[in-house]
Image (cartoon, grey):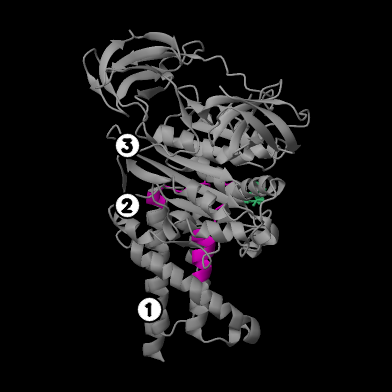
């Protein structure tokens, strides 16, 4: 391997004089502590290296040693359920501590291997060669998971000429050998390396007409995200980005969660880990942490490693996708990642663009979000990576570059509103500033879920919220009482949509998530109220008379009060609503006749 001699150091970047060839994006180690770095520029007599660890001990003259391979991570069965730094080096969950500096490859763990192919079989890239199971070292026994071991995407495949017997093996030990068409032999283990900046190949990208359910009504019903879709969550400080992403991580219907904590507070992440250990996965009854991978580059860790952590995260997500799984990745916060990009760019003396960010900010954001997709994998299964990224615009100004460029690449925007957050209206997603460009593609799925009016009700709700915004301005000027009845009714119905449907506390035992069935029932009830109240208005009954009825209060509180599965109480609410509407109507008719 080539070496180079450091000539200049500035924070996380250094320049060095090479003695031998280096590749762009090659992983290198620097100095006696073998700090991990990556070649980010190459000129004739100089390379520029970004170092992913604290460089304060480095001096000019420090040796840069090439590795001959691109900056890569080792992907294998040991990843799930663990916490890593931005370069996928294990960290201990308890301390949230940073790994010791330098490139010590961890001792590989052993896993149970069960072959699923035989001698003479032809395997292509992405084919299943076996299953890997948890090390029986702890007492998890039968309840342990299994994962697929696949032929890596960059192996041409071939005929199986050796297959290990079932048993325990270190994850990097050869368990299978293939002879390719050229007569070349390939040794495969349960784990393999993959360069983080290169998307893992797939057969093809598939359209997505199935939602990634979050359990949050405002998302699933108003601004839904499909499997393989992308969403950005911009919001000022304290508007609820972290709580929203964590809530989705807990309750969404993904098989695997990849949580990238990027430059945010370390204690938040420690809290999340503790919760994930305690919380049960509603589907398996096992701790949520077991289906989660956490990648941590919190604010107390070296800034430069943040830049890689986003790509490391999405590479891990693609690795599970390739096993035919639905993966959701959340990154909190992409703004902190962009700041790391800006810092490195500044140190290199690059010409700064908007707000000091480098001109390539936009293409780097694209590189990240474009890796989200629902795909047919090389092995022929279907898997998806869905990506949610928090954006923390300075002083909540959404016109800044990171928010702006991100909007070009995402299909959903869940814009958090500072006024809603101040009023403790959570999730503070602003219904008029948010969107989902793909909502219409998901209507069919909802209609198949016994929610045949989903598309119609969704539009109705959005229209009400738009009208409300317009009328509120007027109400502030002339006062609500001076407004005509039909406008007061719009305000009343919008209030119901807001309070009964969109508002949903992440900390309420009953309401922290809602299944599609409960969302559909609630949507229908509110739709019936709105329709019924409009009819009553036609018959001359004032909105205030309807709002005074107990049913209005009951509807307002149904999310908090009626849990999942208690369909009888929802039916009772429906009957009460019918009865109330009829009674008001009849009272009016009688009064009309006698008057
Ligand atoms: P950000 O990450 O945007 O700075 P946080 O997610 O930390 O903001 O939220 C700040 C506070 O707002 C939380 O500590 C919590 O009290 C409240 N909050 C945010 N989202 C919700 C929610 N969905 N339900 C209930 N409370 C919330
Ligand atoms: Mg936060």
Q: Which residue is mark 3?
A: 377
Q: CA distance from mark 2 to mark 1?
A: 35 Å
Label 3: which secondary element: loop
Question: Can you see residue 426?
Answer: no
Mark 1 residue's CB less than 8 Å from ligand 1: no
Residue at (42% x, 22% y) in the render: 145
Q: Which mark is residue 234?
A: none
Label 2: which secondary element: loop
Residue contact between numbered discs 2 and 1, judged by CB atoms under 8 Å:
no
Q: Residues within 10 Å of mark 2 (few under 14, many from 20)?
A: some
Using residue 400 as the reference point, say whether residue 76 is left or right of it.
left
- Residue 451, placed above or below residue 9: below
In magenta stretch: residue 513: yes
Using residue 206 as the reference point, say whether residue 552 is left or right of it.
right
Q: CA distance from mark 3 to mark 1?
A: 53 Å
Residue at (54% x, 36% y) in the render: 25
Mark toward the start of the polypeptide (3 vs 1):
3
Q: Which span of residues is magenta-colored?
A: 494-518
Residue 155 at x, y percent in the picture:
35, 26
Q: Which residue is mark 1?
A: 535
Q: Which residue is mark 2?
A: 209
Quadrant of image for the N terminus: top right
Mark toward the start of the polypeptide (3 vs 2):
2
- Residue 531, placed above or below residue 48: below
Label 1: which secondary element: helix
Using residue 43 as the reference point, say whether residue 569 is left or right of it.
left
Residue at (44% x, 73% y) in the render: 463
Front-lying residue, 54 or 468: 54
Tag nearer the camera, 2 or 1: 2
Mark toward the start of the polypeptide (2 vs 1):
2
């Amino acid at each position: 391997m080539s070496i180079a001699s450091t000539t200049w150091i500035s924070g996380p970047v250094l320049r060095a004089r090479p003695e031998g060839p280096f590749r762009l994006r090659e992983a290198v180690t620097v100095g006696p502590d073998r700090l991990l770095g990556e070649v980010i520029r190459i000129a004739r007599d100089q390379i520029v290296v970004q170092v992913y660890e604290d460089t304060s001990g480095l001096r000019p003259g420090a040796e840069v040693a090439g590795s001959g391979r691109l900056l890569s991570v080792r992907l294998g069965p040991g990843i799930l359920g663990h916490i890593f730094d931005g370069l996928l080096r294990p960290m201990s969950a308890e301390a949230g501590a940073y790994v010791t500096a330098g490139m010590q490859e961890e001792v590989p763990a052993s896993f149970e291997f069960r072959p699923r192919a035989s001698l003479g079989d032809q395997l292509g890239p992405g084919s299943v060669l076996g299953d890997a199971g948890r090390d029986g070292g702890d007492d998890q026994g039968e309840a342990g998971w299994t994962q697929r071991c696949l032929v890596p995407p960059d192996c041409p495949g071939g005929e199986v000429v050796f297959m290990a017997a079932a048993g325990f093996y270190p994850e990097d030990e050869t368990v299978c050998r293939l002879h390719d068409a050229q007569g070349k032999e390939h040794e495969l283990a349960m784990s393999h390396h993959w360069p983080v900046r290169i998307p893992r190949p797939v057969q093809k990208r598939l359209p997505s007409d199935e939602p990634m359910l979050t359990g949050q009504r405002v998302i699933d019903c108003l601004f839904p995200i499909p499997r393989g879709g992308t969403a950005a969550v911009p919001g000022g400080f304290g508007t609820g980005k972290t709580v929203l992403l964590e809530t989705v991580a807990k309750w969404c219907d993904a098989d695997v969660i990849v949580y990238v904590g990027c430059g945010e507070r370390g204690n938040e992440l420690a809290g999340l880990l503790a919760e994930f250990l305690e919380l049960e996965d509603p589907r398996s009854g096992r701790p949520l942490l077991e289906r989660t991978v956490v990648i941590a580059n919190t604010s107390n860790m070296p800034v430069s490693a943040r830049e890689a952590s986003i790509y490391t995260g999405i590479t891990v997500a693609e690795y599970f996708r390739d096993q035919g799984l639905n993966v959701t990745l959340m990154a909190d916060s992409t703004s902190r990642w962009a700041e790391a990009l800006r810092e490195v760019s500044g140190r290199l003396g690059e010409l700064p663009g908007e707000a000091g960010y480098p001109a390539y900010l936009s293409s780097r954001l694209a590189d990240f979000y474009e890796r989200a997709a629902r795909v047919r994998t090389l092995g022929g299964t279907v898997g998806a990576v869905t990506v949610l990224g928090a954006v923390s615009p300075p002083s909540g100004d959404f016109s800044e570059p990171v928010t702006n460029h991100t909007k070009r690449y995402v299909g959903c925007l869940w814009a958090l509103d500072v006024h809603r957050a101040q009023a403790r209206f959570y999730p503070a997603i602003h219904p008029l500033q948010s969107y989902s460009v793909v909502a219409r593609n998901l209507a069919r799925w909802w209609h198949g879920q016994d929610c045949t009016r989903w598309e119609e009700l969704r539009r109705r709700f959005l229209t009400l919220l738009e009208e409300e915004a317009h009328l509120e301005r007027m109400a502030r000027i002339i006062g609500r009482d001076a407004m005509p009845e039909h406008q007061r009714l719009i305000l009343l119905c919008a209030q119901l949509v807001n309070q009964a449907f969109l508002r949903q506390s992440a900390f309420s035992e009953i309401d922290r998530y809602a299944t599609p069935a409960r969302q559909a029932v609630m949507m229908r009830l509110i739709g019936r109220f709105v329709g019924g109240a409009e009819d009553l208005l036609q018959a001359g009954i004032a909105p205030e008379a309807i709002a005074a009825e107990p049913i209005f209060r009951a509807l307002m509180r149904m999310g908090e009060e009626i849990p999942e599965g208690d369909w009888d109480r929802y039916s009772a609410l429906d009957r009460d609503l019918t009865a109330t509407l009829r009674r008001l109507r009849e009272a009016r008719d009688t009064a009309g006749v006698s008057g």
